[in-house]
Structure formats: C-alpha cells, structure tokens
Image (cartoon, rainbow, N blue to C red):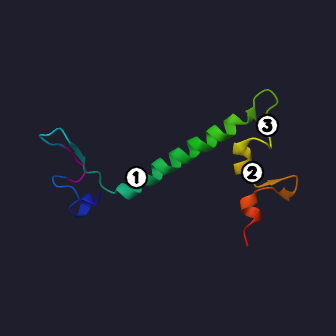
Amino acid sequence: MAVESGGNVEGSKLNEEVVTSNGVRILGMGNLPGRVAVHASQVYSANLHNLLEEYWDKESKAFKLNLEDEIIKGALITHGGQIVSEAVKNIK
C-alpha cells in the first residue's frame, strides 16, 4: 500500500510485481484505493443479483415473498403499506 510514496513493504516498486528470493510476491499496484471501488461494486452487484434470483419465480415472473423467510425478514422494509422492519421502526 502507498507504494507511490515509498510503500510500506521493503522492495516494493510502483506498478511492478517483485518476487523475492524467499518466494514472496510483492505487488506494487499504484492507486490502490481507486481499484477497490471497482471490486466493491462488483461484489455488491453479485450479491444483489443472487438475492433477487433466489426469490424470483421464473414461471410466474414474480417474486416469491415468504414473509417468514429469515433473509426476507432482514431485507424487507415495507409491505402492504406498513413498515415491517423492526430496525427501521426503532429509528428515533
């Protein structure tokens, strides 16, 4: 990390991969914070896709909302015009 300003690992070089004599790989990727956002977005979108796909009924082309399902209980905020999320209800 922070390889642009010298790094925090001896031997790191900007935008290079260094393999030491002990077989350790040192990656000197520049602009590491700029790369994290891409991966965070990919992980978030994959999680959202998997959540929606889990409850999507392909035959009826509708969501299966089992209100007793633990995941649905944790993700659902409103239903039938009412706030059903206990976490949201308790916000003061």
Q: Which mark is residue 76?
A: 2
Q: Of label 1 and label 2, which has the lower sequence position?
A: 1
* Residue 20 point in image, percent of width and height: 14, 42
Dominant secondary structure of the magenta stretch?
Answer: loop
Q: Residue furthest right?
A: 80
Left or right: where 51 falls relative to 33: right
Q: Of label 3 and label 2, which has the lower sequence position?
A: 3
Q: Amino acid at mark 1?
A: Arg
User: Helix or strand or loop: what does disc 3 sit on?
Assistant: loop
User: Helix or strand or loop: what does disc 1 sit on?
Assistant: helix
Q: Name the residue rendered at 75%, 59% in the picture.
A: 86
Query: Compared with residue 57, is residue 10 higher up or lower down, i.e. above or below?
Result: below
Mark pair 1, 2: CA separation: 31 Å
Q: Quadrant of the N terminus?
A: bottom left
Left or right: where 80 falls relative to 41: right
Q: Residue furthest left?
A: 21
Q: Nearer the viewer, residue 31 or 21?
A: 21
The residue identified by callout 3 is 64
The residue identified by callout 1 is 35
Q: Name the residue rendered at 73%, 62% in the picture.
A: 88
